[in-house]
């Protein structure tokens, strides 16, 4: 535990919908944090089970329950808007946090005052046991966003002042991008010039359950991901061509030709473009 940061007040924001089977385990992991100076904001998104009753049974003044019957994105935004801490930690209602999650991320954010959004490594349990790692360097996170999420939503922490400065605190998540709101948030933040970082430790146990992703929902996720990725791809290509069209146009065209001829996978094509963007960022920042 980073003792010098005990006085820092943070907000933990959790949204839930029919999570009676898991909400106790999640809340208990929050209350067990070695950093004790926090508020836990829980937004119920129209639960029809005992979720709210279970939350109400906790006699802890740090817990605040709000009810929302709009949709998941609006519940996320409501929770963020109610937060008053220096940092805001996002929590998924069925996950379990390591007891040092808050303290490790607070320490990282204090040591890196330029970082606006912080993540960490995590692992999964339930349907599949997997370790999740990601880049820790800001420029690599920004460039690699082209081919996927580089800061995991279950372990995101935001610098509140950065959200306020950009007018994002009351509308952080985009209602037009359901099912990939985290990816859209990261890309939009990158386009606004935000900086990122990841703590190189596993700080959350991410629950994978059968109810999370049906085949129909998976198709919707791919659709929304494609829209966000295209926006970012167009921005990156424009930046590369504006910086050095004579050099970058042939390189982009060569990658495109190989992809069209099916000589490389889509992921490899995107990684090729992201590598070009990383080198560009390294020169201009």
Image: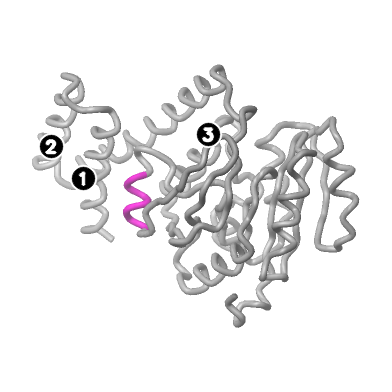
Q: Is residue 110 above or below residue 202?
A: below
Residue 118's disc is none
The residue labelled by disc 3 is 180
Q: Is residue 244 above or below residue 60?
A: above
Q: CA distance from mark 1 to mark 3?
A: 25 Å
The residue labelled by disc 2 is 251
Residue in the picture at 51% in, 42% down: 129
Of pointers 3 and 2, the one earlier in the residue sequence: 3
Q: Are marks 1 and 2 in contact (CB under 8 Å)?
A: yes
Q: CA distance from mark 1 to mark 2?
A: 9 Å
Residue 17 lies, in percent from the top left, at 75, 35
User: How many C-alpha atoms fall within 10 Å of the one at disc 2: few (<14), some, or many (≥20)?
Assistant: some
Residue in the picture at 37% in, 54% down: 135
Q: Are marks 1 and 3 in contact (CB under 8 Å)?
A: no
Magenta part of the chain: 138-144
Most foreground residue, 164 or 232: 232
């Amino acid at each position: 535990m980073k003792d010098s940061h005990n006085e820092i007040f943070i907000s933990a924001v959790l949204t839930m919908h029919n999570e009676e089977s898991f909400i106790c385990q999640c809340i208990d992991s929050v209350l067990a944090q070695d950093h004790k100076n926090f508020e836990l904001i829980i937004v119920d998104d129209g639960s029809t089970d005992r979720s709210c009753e279970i939350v109400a049974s906790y006699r802890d003044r740090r817990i605040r329950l709000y009810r929302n019957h709009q949709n998941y994105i609006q519940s996320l935004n409501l929770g963020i808007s109610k937060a008053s801490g220096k940092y805001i930690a996002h929590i998924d209602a069925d996950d379990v946090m390591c007891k040092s999650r808050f303290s490790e991320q607070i320490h990282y954010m204090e040591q890196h005052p330029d970082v606006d959004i912080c993540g960490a490594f995590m692992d999964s349990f339930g349907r599949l046991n997997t370790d999740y790692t990601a880049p820790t360097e800001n420029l690599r996170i920004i460039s690699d966003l082209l081919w996927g999420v580089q800061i995991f939503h279950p372990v995101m922490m935001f610098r509140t002042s950065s959200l306020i400065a950009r007018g994002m605190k009351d509308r952080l998540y985009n209602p037009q991008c359901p099912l990939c709101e985290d990816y859209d948030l990261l890309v939009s933040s990158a386009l606004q010039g935000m900086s990122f970082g990841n703590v190189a430790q596993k700080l959350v146990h991410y629950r994978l359950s059968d109810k999370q992703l049906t085949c129909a929902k998976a198709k919707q996720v791919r659709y929304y991901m494609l829209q966000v990725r295209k926006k970012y791809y167009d921005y990156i290509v424009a930046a590369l061509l504006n910086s050095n069209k004579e050099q970058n146009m042939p390189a982009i065209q060569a990658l495109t030709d190989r992809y069209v001829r099916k000589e490389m996978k889509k992921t490899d094509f995107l990684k090729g473009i992201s590598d070009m963007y990383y080198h560009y960022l390294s020169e201009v920042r």
